[in-house]
Structure formats: C-alpha cells, structure tokens
Image: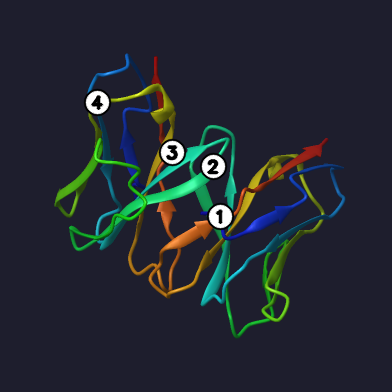
Amino acid sequence: SQQGEEDPQALSIQEGENATMNCSYKTSINNLQWYRQNSGRGLVHLILIRSNEREKHSGRLRVTLDTSKKSSSLLITASRAADTASYFCATDSGNTGKLIFGQGTTLQVKP
Amino acid sequence: DAGVIQSPRHEVTEMGQEVTLRCKPISGHDYLFWYRQTMMRGLELLIYFNNNVPIDDSGMPEDRFSAKMPNASFSTLKIQPSEPRDSAVYFCASSLDPSIVPQHFGDGTRLSIL
C-alpha cells in the first residue's frame, strides 16, 4: 500500500530555476527519506529527516517536515539538466527500515 | 566500493517458466530488501532479511514467489511459474542499519513475461 502521495506528478522547469516537490503521508513516522531515480537505474538516497526535525539541508537540497500536517517538501535550488529524474519520498513508521514509497514526481530540467 | 549488484539486468521469458533473480548486497550490510516497481503500483517492498533471516514477507504477492538468502553475500528471488502480470522491474537494496542509515539500491532487473 502506498503511504505517501506526491505532488505534482510531473514538473518541467528551466535550468537555474528552483523545483519544489511535496509529499503527504497518512500515519505517524520515525523518519522520512527522499530518493532520486534516473531512468533505467536504481534509487539513490538523497536525504533523511527524522520526525523531531523540521528542516534539513544538503548542498542544493532543502527538505522540510511538518508532522502536524503529515507532509514534507523537497526543494532543489538552481536546478541543472542533470537533476532530471524521478523523485520519491519514503516513510519509515516502525523504525525498522521498512520503507513505504510514494508514487514519485518526475522532474524535467530543460537546458 | 562495489554497490549492490543484481543479475540479470534484463530477462524475457515465456509464461510458465521459472525465473530466478539474483542479488549481491554491499559487503557488511546486514539487511537486504527486495522491491518490485510497476507503473500501476509504484515501488512495493516484497520481503526483507536481517542477517540472512527473512523478517517480513508480507509483501510477497503469492506462493509463486519465494526468496532465499543462503549467506550474507547472496540472495535470490524466484518466481515459479511466472505470469505476464509479474512483469516489472525488481530491485534489491541493502543497508547496514536501515533505521538510521539509508538503503543502497541495485540497478534492478527488468523482467518481461510473455
């Protein structure tokens, strides 16, 4: 079953613009993770945010978490063509590492 | 450091045949996960192992699916007999401790059942 719903399903922007993707989930969580998937490849971990954290940064990535609204957002600043990929949020509810993934957002960055 | 290695990368076979997918996790990782990805259902966890022992197989769709981990460096996912609806990309992932560190994914096996 899908825990996370992502919005938008698809996003197309110009290089240099910022991209924002949102994820909503249903049950309480221990942590939420964001992954990237390039076409034909496996998922690559981007960032993990714990339930007691509100914001986290990693390079051009900024993740926020609002547990009261059961939602998270991923912001990619100054996007590049190489950021073109699908982005997934995944939630860990039991601190077991058993992740439930959202349907993903497909991002296209035009050069 | 080698990542998670899956084989084959592509498999095309006829309905009714047995299919075996293979995975070599990252050395030292105690956890191994098998996922299936389809357009309709997204990415679903099928089963995961800790120290070679299956912990949760609630995602395994039916008895036609089985998974084993005979040692710390090898796992298989078997489908017998295969059906067209099993067509999907199957991913293996491993982790040192998934409650605190991320999972590392292989590049998947694209399975087509004709």
Q: In whole angstroms, how far apart are the C-alphas of marks 1 and 4?
A: 27 Å
Marks 1/2 in contact by CB < 8 Å: the verdict is yes
Q: What percent of the width, then of the height, locates residue A38?
A: 59, 39
Q: In whole angstroms, how far apart are the C-alphas of marks 3 and 4?
A: 24 Å
Provide the residue designation for mark 4.
B81
Marks 1/4 in contact by CB < 8 Å: the verdict is no
Q: Residue at x 18, y 46 (%)?
A: B68
Q: In whole angstroms, how far apart are the C-alphas of marks 1 and 3?
A: 22 Å
Q: What percent of the width, then of the height, locates residue A98?
A: 41, 63
- Residue B66's place in the image compared with B13, above or below, is below
- Residue B72's place in the image compared with A71, above or below, is above
Q: Nearer the viewer, residue A74 or A98?
A: A98
Whether labels 1 and 4 share one chain: no
| Chain under numbered label 1 | A
Q: Secondary structure at mark 3?
A: loop
Provide the residue designation for mark 3.
B107
Most extreme residue toward the front, as rendered? B62
Marks 3/2 in contact by CB < 8 Å: the verdict is no
Left or right side of A72 for A20 = right
| Chain under numbered label 3 | B
Q: What percent of the width, then of the height, locates residue A25?
A: 63, 66
Q: Nearer the viewer, residue B102 or A90?
A: A90
Left or right side of A30 for A105 = right
Q: Residue at x 84, y 55 (%)?
A: A18
Marks 1/3 in contact by CB < 8 Å: the verdict is no
Whether labels 3 and 2 share one chain: yes
- Residue A55's place in the image compared with B81, above or below, is below
Provide the residue designation for mark 2.
B41
Q: Nearer the viewer, residue A33 or B60?
A: B60
